[in-house]
Image: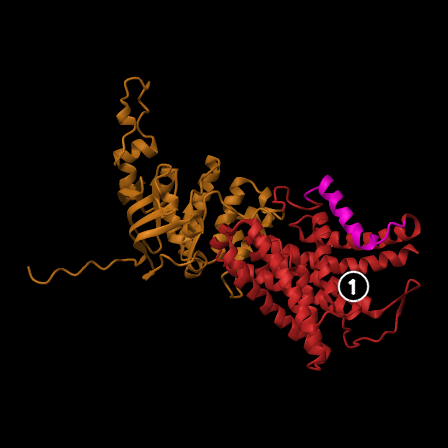
Amino acid sequence: MSAPAPAPVAATEMLLEVNNIEVVYNDVILVVRGLSLAVLKGEIIALLGANGAGKSTTLKAISGLLKTEEGEVTRGEIRFAGERINGIDPHLIVRRGIFQVMEGRRIIADMTCLENLRLGAFTRSDNQVKSDIDMVYGYFPRLKERTGLAGYLSGGEQQMLAIGRALMARPKLILMDEPSMGLSPLLVKEVFGIIQRINRELGVTILLVEQNARMALSVASYGYVMEQGKVVLDGTAAALADNEDVKEFYLGGHGAERKSFRGLKSYKRRKRWL
Amino acid sequence: MLLPLILNGLIVGALYGVVAMSFVLIYKASQVVNFAQGEFLLVGAWVCWWFLTDWQMPFWMGFLFTLAFMTCFGIILQVVVLRPLIGEPVISVIMATVGLSIFFQALMKWIFGVFAKPFPPIFSAQSVDILGLQVQPVYLLSLGISLFIMAGFGWFFTASKHGLAMRATAFDQQVAQSLGISVPKVFAMSWAISAVVSAVAGVVVGVVNGVSSALSFYGIKVFPAVILGGLDSVVGAVLGGLVIGVLENVAQYVDAEWLHWGNMYAIAPFYALVIILMIKPYGLFGTRNIERV
């Protein structure tokens, strides 16, 4: 009943804070409405949701790439390492330590692997680029053998190259958009294993957007579920994995005992939080 | 009889190649078809001539001053004229560069007069004997400089980080930005490099032939070269330049010996241009889906 209890001191510091943002494309299309999330330093945070929920848009709002697509954060603020970063040009946000690995890998097809990696280090001017290239080859040994154009790499190798290219920038935070897209289950496992190692060994914080919710929750410590531009559910990865609705919509846990879809009510299948 | 023709063609063709490369550089990086490329040569040559005669500078100094001037010239042109046009229809951008071309031609005539003026003698006129041919050292120097610039382009685009950034921007601007590259800076840099390189070619031609508005004709000769090589290929530009250089010399010889149509030297490259557009519109190394203008 005396002085208010002091706020509990966070064990890890806040790296990224998205506060009630609203994103509008072309001045009319409202894609993200009132989204908030927090990313603590050194963690892997999963951002889940169906197609069109606004996950990629959220990442682009953070990395500033929204600007290249006629999008704009019209409300709220994004703070990185304590500083407000919305409205800053994307190339300057990269210099602050946020690097986005875009959906579909987006490597530069008419350059070699090595040139792609060196481009990742574009913002750096120190002399450790060479040793970092070896570090990336340490994580992705098969990239070292590929001397041809990056466009001829397999999908998995391209994803590895895209992640390696991000590491070359020595970012504090990597925004990863659908790293499992178009990969075989075995490769997905491999890529996620490496994502986990990168997080643990290099201390890079990762915000992960993923369709493969089971995989994402297995590596993440905390997760957010988005729907129609809003966060509808959040919690620790374990709690989300146990959540009945998450199980039904994203993990496919239900239905194993179901023999047919007859009698299944449509509202049940189409259930939404909003 | 054919050997000196081909040698001459290669010397001039290497210069075409250099100008064509700087044209392709702008097109690749910023998707602008620069009709004022020839005026870069003209402005560069006149400015260098001005430093050497009115300011009495030694050649190396005047040359370096010219390069510095052209760097600023390219950047200012991009920032003031072309940057506001980003996102406008292709035809508007083309009209702007055509306008620039006319403007600088007139400006140079207004400042320096309409008559050709020779550069102060820089090299001894003693000709050198190569394979039984008497070649002036100026031509050898011209060939040397052209090759040096081509090698420099090769180094820039594969080894330097800004060259890689330029290629990345040409490939996909959004990806370039996600890597921390400033696209407006890349645009300005491409114009600066293009202006400098063209000016070097302009000075070389000026030293050989004297400076006059005829220099801007190189900007027109660039079109057959880049159409042959492919509008977005640096290697193609070099090859195209060499082929066009040899072609015009051989065409002139053929014309003088047998055809007697007259003026084939100036016209043959454009016959070639029309034929290339008919049979291989994307050139030897060009990307198939680029827009034609």
Quarter-wise, where is residue B65 in the image? bottom right
User: What chain letter is assigned to the residue under label 1?
Assistant: B
Q: Name the foreground residue: B160 vs B130.
A: B130
Q: Mark 1 points at which residue?
A: B143
* SS type, badge 1: helix
**Furthest-bottom residue in this view:** B56
How many labels were placed on the picture? 1
Chain A in the picture: what colour? orange
Q: Is residue A264 left or right of A151 when viewed as pictured?
A: left
**Where residue B115 sits in the image (x, y, percent)?**
75, 70
Magenta segment main secondary structure: helix
Q: Nearer the viewer, residue A236 or B127?
A: B127
Which one of the lettered chains is coloured red?
Answer: B
What residue is shown at x 91% (from left), y 62% (from top)?
B131
Residue A37, image x and y in percent? 29, 50
Which residue: 40% across, 54% down?
Answer: A64
Camera-nearest residue between A176 and B225: B225
Q: Residues within 10 Å of mark 1 (few under 14, many from 20)?
A: some
Asked whether the viewer can see residue A122, the reply is no
The image quarter containing residue B114 is bottom right
Query: What residue type is disc 1 on?
Result: Leu
In the picture, measured across the screen, residue A152 lies left or right of residue B144, that is left
Q: Magenta residues, as a range?
A: B260-282
Residue in the picture at 68% in, 61% down:
B38
